[in-house]
Amino acid sequence: MQVISAIAAFLIAHALTVLIVLLCMNLLAFALFGADKKRAQRGGWRVPESTLLAAAAFFGAAGAFIGMRVFHHKTKHRKFTVLLPLLLALQAAVLVLLVVVGL
């Protein structure tokens, strides 16, 4: 529990930095979905699925989920339609837990 409290205290002390990093990760995930969709339409080099999922896993799930919906990309792949909402819920829960513990 002390480790979680220490992490929460660090994140709260550096809240602006954390928000900027989260925003960047989500923008990156969103952009990757858009780029992959465009490349798929043009028959170009594709972004590997592992890269798309990694961007989502590193606290970019919201951007990835929004990108999937906006670009209508990977919406028929169970891997994405199941994992992205789960990652989003998990990441939101972790952030809420860290903020609540840190208060």
Image (tube, helix red, strand yellow):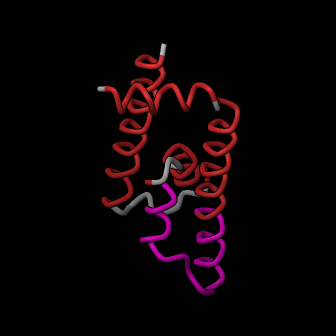
Q: Is residue 9 magenta?
A: no
Side of 33 relative to 84 (left or right): right
In terms of image quadrants, where is residue 12? Answer: top right
Q: Position of residue 82 (x, y in %)?
A: 32, 50
Residue 88 vs residue 59, the one in the foreground = 59
Residue 16 vs residue 3, the one in the foreground = 3
Q: Position of residue 51 (x, y in %)?
A: 49, 70
Please, is residue 34 above or below residue 20 in the view?
below
Please, is residue 23 above or below residue 10 in the view?
below
Residue 1 vs residue 87, the one in the foreground = 1
Q: Position of residue 60 (x, y in %)?
A: 53, 49
Q: Write the start and end of the magenta stretch as one range.
A: 33-56
Please, is residue 101 above or below residue 29 in the view?
above
Residue 16 vs residue 40, the one in the foreground = 16
Q: Which residue is at a point 53% across and 43% down the rendered structure image?
A: 62
> How many numbered marks, from 0 up?
0
Q: Which residue is at a point 36% across and 38% down the rendered structure image?
A: 90
Q: Position of residue 6 (x, y in %)?
A: 44, 29
Quick one: which residue is furthest to the bottom in this view?
44
Magenta stretch secondary structure, dominant: helix
Q: Which residue is at a point 44% across and 71% down the rendered structure image?
A: 49
Side of 28 relative to 61 (left or right): right
Give the position of the N terminus as an image quadrant: top left
Please, is residue 4 above or below residue 28 in the view?
above
Q: Which residue is at a point 63% across and 86% down the rendered structure image?
A: 44
